[in-house]
Image (cartoon, rainbow, N blue to C red):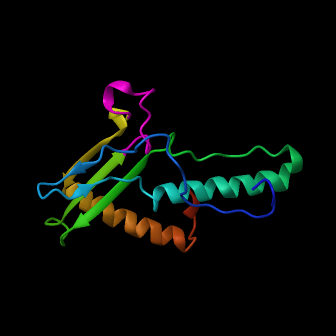
């Protein structure tokens, strides 16, 4: 904040230059308007940028270099688990890059980089969700080497 240099905040508040996704309707006519994720991975990345800015200001004073966390340059992943059992569960894994489509950079693919945007359903998503669950609990408890677990 230019007016209050000692007040910091992180979170998702943005005004995209265009719709993030094409609005659609289901068979009953209900409008479905997808929105970018506001929790999880993007929130972790913006928090890390804010902390980087604070550290830079402490170390460098007026010569601080600031970090950015634009959703136009950031990807996101979502993993959802459904069902129970090590070999009978089901899950979905979805990634998107960038979160906010860049129609100029990727005009042929709806604003997304296809090699980094995909979704899949199956047992692997269930296992991944279980691994992430325990990894994030480990990180939250700040156990040895917690800092190498990504957001």
Figure disc tally: 0
Q: Position of residue 135 (x, y in %)?
A: 44, 65
Q: Camera-side residue: 7 or 33?
A: 33
The single residue placed furthest to the right in the displayed view is: 62
Based on the picture, tell me whether residue 147 belongs to the magenta stretch. Answer: no
Question: Which quarter of the image is occupied by the N terminus?
Answer: bottom right
Q: Is residue 77 above or below residue 147?
A: above
Q: Residue at x 58, y 55 (%)?
A: 46
Work out whether residue 15 or residue 135 is closer to the camera in this orientation and state it: 15
User: Residue at the location (71% across, 62% down)?
Assistant: 8
Residue 28 quadrant = bottom left
80 lies above or below 142: above
Give the residues in magenta. 96-111
Residue 105 vertical placement versus 67 (above, below): above
User: Horizontal and vertical percent for residue 66?
Assistant: 73, 46
Q: In the depicted view, which residue is nearer to us: 143 or 118?
A: 118
Residue 62 pos. (x, y %)? 88, 47
Residue 150 shows in the view = no
Residue 72 in the image, given as x and y percentages of width and height = 50, 40
**Visible in this render: residue 122?**
yes
Image-quadrant location for residue 100? top left
Going 46% across and 59% down the picture, which residue do you hit?
38
* 49 shown above or below 73: below
**Quarter where residue 106 is shown:** top left
96 with respect to 71 (left or right): left
Relative horizontal placement of residue 55, taking residue 45 as reference (left or right)? right
């Amino acid at each position: 904040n230019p007016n209050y240099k000692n007040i910091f905040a992180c979170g998702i508040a943005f005004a995209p230059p265009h719709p993030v996704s094409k609005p659609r309707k289901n068979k009953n006519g209900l409008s479905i308007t997808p929105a970018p994720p506001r929790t999880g991975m993007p929130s972790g990345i913006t928090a890390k940028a804010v902390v980087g800015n604070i550290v830079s200001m402490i170390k460098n004073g007026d010569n601080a270099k600031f970090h950015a966390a634009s959703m136009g340059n950031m990807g996101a992943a979502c993993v959802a688990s459904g069902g129970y059992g090590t070999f009978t569960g089901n899950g979905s894994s979805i990634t998107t890059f960038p979160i906010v489509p860049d129609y100029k950079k990727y005009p042929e693919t709806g604003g997304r980089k296809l090699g980094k945007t995909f979704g899949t359903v199956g047992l692997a998503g269930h296992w991944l969700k279980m691994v992430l669950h325990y990894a994030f609990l480990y990180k939250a408890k700040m156990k040895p080497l917690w800092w190498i677990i990504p957001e």
